[in-house]
Image (tube, rainbow, N blue to C red):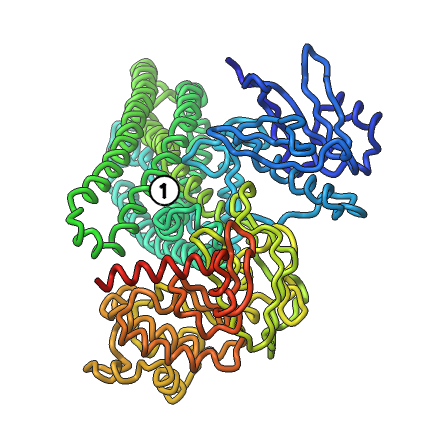
Amino acid sequence: MSDPSPPTSENGRLDHLPLDLQERIRDEVPSDQVRSVAAYDLSEEGRYVQGYLVLGADRLGSFVLSDGRWCGEWFPAGRFDQSKIVEGLGMSLLRLVADGKVLTEFRFTLRHAKEVARLHRRLERMLSGGEEGQEQEPPEPPRDDERKLRCDKCGRVIPPWAETCPACMSRRKVLFRLLDFVRPYRTRAIGGAALAIGLTLASLAMPWLTRPMLDVGLGAGTGKPHLGVFLALVSAMASLTLLIAAGHGLQSRLMAGLGSRVARNVRDTAYEHLHKLSLSFFSRKQTGNLVTRVTNDSDRLWDFIAFTIVEVSVALLTIAGVGAALFLMNWKLACFVLLPIPFMIALTVFFHQKLHRFFFRLHHRWGQMTAVVADALPGVRVIKAFSQEKREVGRFRRRNQQLYEEEMKMIGTWTVFGPIMMFFTHVGTIVIWLLGGYWVIRDWGQPGGMTVGTLMAFIGYMGMFYRPIHMIAHMDRMFNRAATSAQRIFEVLDTEPAIFSKTGAAQAGNVRGRIELRNVSFSYDGIRHVLKNVSLTIEPGEMVGLAGPSGGGKTTMVNLICRFYDPLEGQILIDGVDVRDYDLESLRKRIGVVLQEPFLFHGTIAENIAYGNPDATVDQILSAARAANAHDFIVGFPDAYDTMVGERGQTLSGGERQRISIARAILNNPSILILDEATSSVDTETEKLIQEALDRLIANRTTIAIAHRLSTLRKADRLVILEKGVIVEQGGHDQLARKEDGLYAKLLRMQNETQSIMAI
């Protein structure tokens, strides 16, 4: 059964509906009262339909296309008092409820889940009375993690191995964008181009000298050799050979240097841009895939700029120069030289399209294989602990085999292309030998006829003519590789950061640390709410503990405060200023984070402590380490603070890494501190040392502590209990512990029972 489901309505606007439906709605509801629209695609019986939901200022409309006509109904807000989305397997439904009874339901597949969820949020605000005065769809925070499924231009499905539509991508435009990186080195590029022109002209002279060499020097045309002419022409050829060799050396040096500079700038730009993107972007991308874009793809661009561009330019100049020489020598023979060209061009265009698709898939397979390595090596301890070496080797071999199969498909296509091109070249050569030889024999001894020298010079030029055409056709492979690599890099560069500083953003400066969440809602996927209408105020210097079941939204809340993400709805204010109005860098410098699994970079202990403050003095580093109870174990190492911590700090214990992480936070001197399970997974003695360090760090700072071990939150001024994205309880430890039917008391009893069992 075909799927007649409607196209998605990405921004929820009326002008995205079919024109005839737009006209009907405008007749029934003023355009300025349309708040949101969304498509749905299933009937009550589960059949595909083309339907739309339209939310007005005080009503919800449903319209379905039936027999070429739009059938619809309006549901005034007074007819229902509640709406909710019910998720199912492969589909969901929007349900309207009146007095506890189901009024109606609208079913939709996951394709339309985001737009229906957006309309539902507006509908909920309308039912709660919070929609008055709002005439337009409020802008949602930008997202840099969403992948388009269909091309906006042609409507084709974008294959999983590409970010943009391969059919619509202009390879010329992509490669022309590289000129922006070449422009700073235009002098070097112009010098390389001038050398290419000079070398081409010098090469053209070589076959031309063959003509007098044979006809005069060796006497093929005159019947009498001439030693002086022969030696002069040999000397001229030798001089040209030396000149061409020296010129090629200089040109290679210039263009290789240009390619290296451009590749360096591309790598710098791509890596810098990656750091501007939000966490949501990296949650969807494989690390290995991004690594190959910054490294392998930029290296292919170097190869393209340093050699391919030069060789193609020289080839084009050679074709033009040799073509002119051929027509000057004998225009009739020159016409026969051109006969295979249309077939060669058609063949190149045909294989060009096939090769481009192969290279896209090939690069995708490279990224997948690299991702396996990037995923496995950091977890080598876990692999060895569970004896899963064979399994990981198997994963790599499968990805490597997929890469090999794609390469063999590409090689199979390429090896068909090469021999066919060579066949056309040899056909042209045979035709010239046949006609040229016949004319030499026919015109032997006649003045002005075809001579042996002319034929040999013509044959030499013909080789020079076909060779660059053959080379350009084969360069199509390099062209496709470079275009694919450039496109993969530009896909990263063209991704707009979802989180960025506004123009004229305020500096955080001396933040007091008052945090306020006003009706904050958030969803990672735009469908399921992780936080729902959360409001909370934290005073300067107050310590607030966040607790509750896993998945309640605790980590999401601190991610929003750090502005790793922006809320879907509502505001987060620090000292009365919306976090979106602060300069991002200055805001994050005022917030210190101590994670459950501290990340240490490959380097010395001192470098890791000073990571947030690279200009810190030795005394400041030592003071921070002492405050974090880290100094004693650090000086116990042979190299003390110069000890290398290894990849991700693997040479240190978990407690040692945690104390270095605390020292890093102390040295940064934040106004707001976030502790995410900072004392979990350590022994009792280490926990005591870490807790002492945290007590020093917490003093006079606004602190938010997340913990599943509730005993670690006893010192908190206030506890906030989250469940399913909603604050269900607030209060002090003793107050909430006495509330027998409360969630906190229940969690506390469960932990005490678990600890009692473990003690036995």
Residue 485's x, y, as percent?
41, 43
Residue located at (42% from left, 58% from top): 747
Q: Is 339 rendered above or below residue 122?
A: above
Closer to us: 314 or 267: 267
Closer to us: 293 or 313: 293
Count how many numbered circles sit on residues in the image: 1
Residue furthest out toward the bottom: 619
Residue 527's x, y, as percent?
55, 41
Q: Is 160 rendered above or below residue 42?
A: below
Q: Is 99 rendered above or below residue 621?
A: above
Q: Is residue 579 visible?
A: no
Residue located at (30% from left, 46% from top): 370
Q: Is residue 425 left or right of residue 580?
A: left
Q: Is residue 630 left or right of residue 665?
A: left
Quadrant where the C terminus sits is bottom left
Quadrant of residue 518 in the image? bottom right
Q: Is 32 rendered above or below residue 508?
A: above
Q: Is residue 139 visible?
A: yes
Closer to us: 758 or 373: 758
Residue 448's x, y, as percent?
40, 22
Label 1: which residue?
203
**Circle 1 — which element?**
helix
Residue furthest out toward the top: 67
Q: Residues within 10 Å of mark 1 (few under 14, many from 20)?
A: some
Residue located at (38% from left, 80% from top): 693
Quadrant of residue 586 in the image? bottom right
The amino acid type, in three-letter code, at marker 1 is Ser
